Image (cartoon, rainbow, N blue to C red):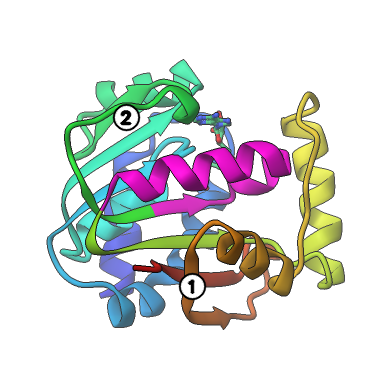
Amino acid sequence: MYREIKKKMYKSYKKFKGLVYIKIKTSTYDIPFIQENFKSNSIILDVGSGEGVLSFIFFLLGKGKNITCIDTDSNKISFIRESKLPMIGICNNILDFTSKHKYDLIILNDFLHHKTDEDITKIIKILGDYLAPNGVIYLKEFDKNDFYDYFYTFLWDSFLYPEDKLNFKNKSQWIEIFNKNKFELRYFKKYTSLWPASRSQFIFNKNV
Ligand SMILES: C[S@@+](CC[C@H](N)C(=O)[O-])C[C@H]1O[C@@H](n2cnc3c(N)ncnc32)[C@H](O)[C@@H]1O
C-alpha cells in the first residue's frame, strides 16, 4: 500500500522541478502516524502547504475529502492548481486568512519555525477561530535538541529561505507556546529516519 501511494505521488508531482522528490520521501514516513491518528474524510487546512505533498498523502489515505492549501508562494500554489491535484490552492498570507469554513484538521508542517514568536502566537490564535468543535492541529516540527534535525534543517533552510529568521524550538518549547495560546497536547511522537527532517509530531486540541 505504501508503495502504491508513493507511486501515485511521484506520478502527480513529476512535472515539478526541485526538491519535491525529497519531500515525498520524507513525508511518506508519516503514513503510519496519519493512518492511526486521524479520522477519515476530514475537512483540512494545510498552512504553509508548499506544493501540498503532505495534504495529498492525507487525501490518498482517505483522511481528507475537502482540503485547502494556503501558501504565500505563488509558484507552489500554481503547481497545485495546474496539476489538478485534489486540493484547493490559495495564495495568501495566513495572517490575512479569512474563511467561512471550520476545519477538522489544520496541518502545520515544517512551517512554524520560519516565524517569529509574535507571528506564531498570531497564527495560533487565527487558527483557533477556524477549528471545528473537536478539531485538531497537527504540528510537524524540528527538535532543536536533536543535533541532526537542527544541523541539516539549518543548512537547507538557510539555503532555501535566506530571508527567514529561523526559530528552532525543542519539544517542550513547542508545547509551551501552544499551551500559552489555549491549546493542549493530545499526542506526541518522534520517529527516526535516515532523512533528518521534521520528525516530531504533535497533535493539539483546543482547550474549551
Ligand atoms: C519549509 S516550507 C514547508 C512547505 C510544506 N509544508 C512542506 O512541508 O512541503 C514553508 C512554506 O511556508 C510558506 N509561508 C511562509 N510564510 C507564510 C505565511 N505567512 N502564510 C502562508 N504561507 C507561508 C512558504 O512560502 C513555504 O512554502
CB contact under 8 Å: marks 1 and 2: no
Which of the two marks, 1 or 2, is nearer to us in this view? Answer: 1
Q: Tag 2, which secondary structure?
A: helix
Ligand 1 within 8 Å, label 1 CB: no
Residue found at x 76% / y 60%? 169
- Label 2 neighbour load within 10 Å: few <14, some 14-19, many 20+: many
Magenta stretch, residue numbers: 107-131
Q: Does 110 appear in magenta?
A: yes
Split into 4 quadrants, where in the image is the C terminus?
A: bottom left
Please state if 119 lies on the left or on the right of 167 as rendered. Answer: left
Estimate the x, y position of residue 149 in percent, counting from the top left.
77, 64
Amino acid under disc 1: Glu
Q: Does 205 appear in magenta?
A: no
Task: Kindly identify which numbered label has been placed on residue 13.
Answer: none
Q: Check disc 1 and report the residue beneath it.
A: 184
For the residue pair 123 and 9, the one nearer the viewer reads as: 123
Answer with the quarter of the image where residue 85 lies.
Answer: top left
Please state if 198 lies on the left or on the right of 144 as rendered. Answer: left
Q: Check disc 2 and report the residue beneath it.
A: 80
Q: Tag 1, which secondary structure?
A: strand
Q: How many marks?
A: 2
Split into 4 quadrants, where in the image is the N terminus?
A: bottom left
Q: Quadrant of ligand 1?
A: top right
